[in-house]
Amino acid sequence: SLGQERNALLIQLEHRFYGESLPNGNVDTDNLKLLTVENALADLAGFIDWYTAEQGTTGKWFAFGGSYPGALSGWFRKAYPDHTAGSLSSSGVVNAINEFTAFDERVATAIGDECADNVRAVTAAFERAVVGEDATNATNADAKALFGCAADMWDEDYFYMLADSAAMADQYGSKFALCDTLGAMGSDATDATKMETFANFTNTYWGADFGSGCFYDSACLADKSKYEAGATDRSWRWQKCYQLAYFQPAPAEGSLRSSVVTMDYHYEQCMKVFGLAPPDVSNINDKFGAEKIQVDKVFFSDFSDDPWREASVVSNDDIPATSEFHLVQCDECGHCMDFSTPSDTEPAALTAERQAFEVKLDEWLEIA
């Protein structure tokens, strides 16, 4: 509706190495060196230049992005400030964090103490079956089979997948579905019940191939012959290992995820899949400013339940007065929530944020 109301042309660009845009036609490790933030930003600028010249357009450009593309929309204003009138950076992860334990901690806070304890109980049940003192090859394989995972899948990969299933329920505004499902187990639930309940939730909510696909399987990620056209798994893992990190280990206290998910695991995965040592995130953060990015005419929006929140701008005090930060606070206010279709039943805080953005959108377009 924003575009229609302003008689705007909406163009969605495909990021290099995501989808059909494969430079040199492959995702080999040497070729993935072309997959960088800087090249992605140059692609955006190049497209604007090409389209403007090809079509002879005189209109103003405005960038929109959410999550990593939200970071790009903020970084784009830093790298190419003359190409757009402004941008919306929704849940934009402009702060590349190496040891991102705040991710898990934000989920625990968002879902509440009772639900967090239930997630921990489920994790503990899986730990006893997979890596516990009494675990056997059979109990390990049976636990993995609940998600269609191979018995030889790295245990660390498996527990990272389990953690992501729970975190994504919070991240995408469905924490009540997760918490209601786990709460219905009862305090006397057996380990088998806990594991089966969580597996059923995961397979139903995220799809039967959530755990068994390539995304969480290091051995599969390392085998470029298993790449499927359009898949994002190998490309996103490359960006994390090469520049951005955002590694999510278990916090030292109160962790929802298994303690086997360590920084060493993330580093080992980068080495196994790409032969890469961990990235120095100070390079990207020094270049663009991280959460204190000094950039003009960017509307940074974030949401109270979003696990990625601490990787974003966190305060108006940290950015210039010519940009704005808005934190939307409400239950199930998750990742990039303002990219959803407006609704009469949406939280009032979200509606207020949308209205604040529209004011800035029109102001920045007017003065550009």
Image (spheres, rainbow, N blue to C red):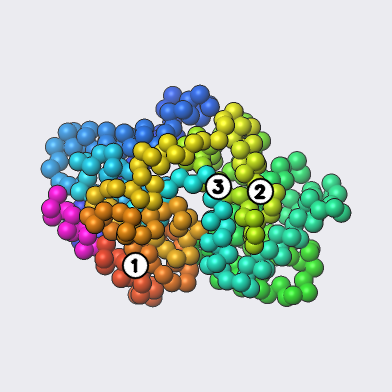
Q: Amino acid under label 2?
A: Val
Please give the name of the residue rendered at 30% of the width and 65% of the height, measured from the top-left corner. 354
Please provide percent x and percent y for residue 61: 21, 46
Q: Earlier in the sequence, mark 3 or mark 1?
A: 3
CB atoms of marks 3 and 2 within 8 Å: no
At 78% across and 74% down in the image, what residue appears?
A: 188
The residue nearer to you, when weighing 148 against 242, is: 242
Q: Is residue 343 above or below residue 310?
A: below
Amino acid under disc 1: Pro
Q: Magenta segment: does it hold 360?
A: yes
Q: Quadrant of the N terminus?
A: bottom left
Identity of the residue drawn at 14% across and 49% down: 368
Q: Secondary structure at mark 2?
A: loop
**Residue 339, visible in the rendered structure:** no
Label 3 environment density (alpha carbons within 10 Å; few <14, some 14–19, many ≥20): some
Of the numbered discs in the image, which one, if any, rests on residue 99?
Answer: 3
- Label 3 secondary element: loop
Left or right for 3, reference 255: left
- 347 and 324: which is toward the camera: 324
Tag of residue 261: 2
Residue most toward the front?
A: 317
Please report whichever mark, 2 or 1, sits nearer to the chain's N-terminal start.
2
User: For mark 1, what is the residue?
Assistant: 342
Marks 3 and 2, how far apart at CA: 12 Å
Label 1: state its secondary structure. loop
Which residues lie in the magenta part? 358-368
In the drawing, what numbered circle is on residue 194?
Answer: none
State which tag comes first along the sequence, 3 or 2. Answer: 3
Say which amino acid is labelled 3.
Glu
